[in-house]
Image (spheres, grey):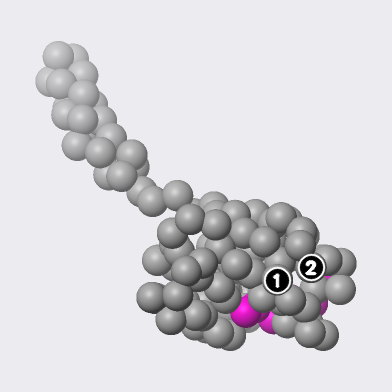
Amino acid sequence: MKRFILTLVLIAAIAAPVFAAAPPKTAAGKVTAIEGTKVTIAIEGDKPEWVKKNGFVKFKSGTGKIVEVSASDIKPATFVATYKKASDMKVGDAVTFEKGLSVAGC
């Protein structure tokens, strides 16, 4: 029994830093432009590393695909995403977004 408890404690001690070190997947920004189904977002703070061309982004009411990302030396960083519900957004709106999952195969 002691060996079992010791094993559990050891596993928890090893796994805790792995889960605690995960970078946040949620970010905030402001809508700067809307053109049809494309929405341009200016990111507040540092650009998350998962924001890259052909990646997916999840907004409050759906998922979009990132089609363009500003150069890394431009502040604030911006990205353009295709989003079916872009017409629901307004220029100047504050938005939160997170890393989205691919919708392939659905």
Q: Nearer the viewer, residue 93 or 50?
A: 93
Q: Is residue 45 above or below residue 10?
A: below
Q: Which mark is residue 42?
A: none
Q: Write the residue at 62% across / 59% down.
A: 29
Vertical position of residue 9 compared to residue 20: above or below? above
Other-residue count near label 2 (Cα within 10 Å), few / some / many at <14 / 14–19 / ≥20? few
Q: Is residue 34 left or right of residue 95?
A: right
Query: Residue visible at 73% across and 82% down?
Result: 38
From the viewer's perspective, is 31 left or right of 4? right
CB atoms of marks 2 and 1 within 8 Å? yes
Question: Where in the figure is residue 2, as x and y percent of width and height?
Answer: 14, 14
4 or 35, which is in the foreground?
35
What amino acid is labelled 1 in the image? Thr
Position of the C terminus, as image quadrant, is: bottom right
Please identify the quadrant where the N terminus is shown: top left
Q: Read off the residue under disc 1.
A: 32
Disc on the earlier residue, 2 or 1: 1
From this viewpoint, is residue 84 visible? yes
40 vs 20, left or right, is right
Q: In the rendering, at what x and y percent does residue 96 appear?
A: 65, 54
The residue closer to the viewer here, 55 or 95, is 95
Residue at label 2? Answer: 91
Locate residue 103, reporting x and y percent.
Answer: 63, 75
Q: Secondary structure at mark 1?
A: strand
Residue 83 among magenta residues: yes
- Which residue is found at the position 71% from the left and 55% from the top? 94
For the residue labelled by badge 2, is the local secondary structure a helix, a strand or a loop? loop
Magenta range? 80-85
Residue furthest to the top in view is 2
